[in-house]
Image (spheres, rainbow, N blue to C red):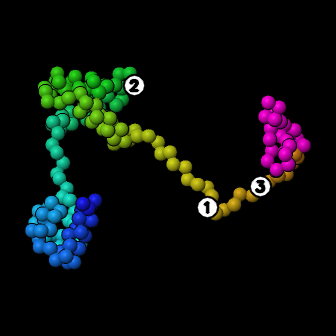
Amino acid sequence: MPLSKVDLYAAIRHDARVEGLSSRALSTKYGVGRRTVAMALESVWPAPRKQLPPRISRLDPFKATIDQILREYLDAPRKQRHTAKRVFDRLIDEHDARGVTYSMVRAYIAVRRPEIRVEEGRGPPQAFVPQTHHPGDVQTEDRTGYERSKFRHWVDADRDSCNTRLICMLR
C-alpha cells in the first residue's frame, strides 16, 4: 500500500497505464473510491486540502469582556492585577458565563495578555543589538605589552603548544 497520497496517485496511474486495469479494478485494489481513481488519472498532484472555517468557541461572546478586564488592570500594581482564576470567577458571577471553563479562560488570557500589553505600548523592549562590523571583517590582535613570563600559572608541560594550568597538573 502506498505511503502518501502522491504515492497512491503514482501507483494508480502506473497500474492504469502499464497493466491496463479499469477504474473499478483500481478502486478495489487500492481501497479508494472511483472518484479518487478518476482524480488520480486526471492529475499528477492531489488537490490541496480545503481549509475549514475557524470553529466558534463558547468563549467568543466573552472575549471582549475579558479584554476589557485585562485593560482595566493594566495600570494596577502586579499584586493587584486579576489572575485567570479571578477573571473566570467574574465571568461566572457578573456575566453568567455558564458554558465557559476555567482552562478556556486561562489559555485565552495566556495568549491575549502579552498582546494587549503590546497594543497599549507597554510591550517588552526591543532586544535586538545590531552588529557594528560587517561580516568578513577581521579583528586585528594587539599584543603590545604581553609577556609570557607574567603568566606563571600557565605551563606548556608536554610542549604541544596548548597551555595547561599548573594547578590542574598538581592534582
The alpha-carbon separation of the residues under discs 1 and 3 comes to 17 Å
Residue 23 screen position, x and y as percent: 11, 71
Residue 35 appearing in the image: no
- Give the residue at mark 1: 134
Residue 158 screen position, x and y as percent: 84, 45
First reached walking from the N terminus: tag 1 or tag 2: 2
- In the image shown, does 118 or 45 lie closer to the viewer? 45
- Give the residue at mark 3: 141
Q: Residue at x 17, y 39 (%)?
A: 57
Q: Residue at x 61, y 61 (%)?
A: 134
Q: Is residue 158 magenta?
A: yes
Under mark 2, the amino acid is: Arg
Under mark 3, the amino acid is: Glu
> Helix, strand or loop at disc 3?
loop
Q: Residue at x 81, y 35 (%)?
A: 169
First reached walking from the N terminus: tag 1 or tag 3: 1
For label 3, the crowd category at 10 Å Cα-Cα, with few meaning under 14, some 14 to 19 and many 20 or more, is few
- Magenta segment, which residues? 149-171
Residue 56 screen position, x and y as percent: 15, 43
> Helix, strand or loop at disc 1?
loop
On screen, residue 141 versus residue 10, left or right, reads: right
- Give the residue at mark 2: 78
- In the image shown, does 49 or 74 lie closer to the viewer? 49
Under mark 1, the amino acid is: His
Residue 79 appearing in the image: yes
Residue 46 screen position, x and y as percent: 22, 66
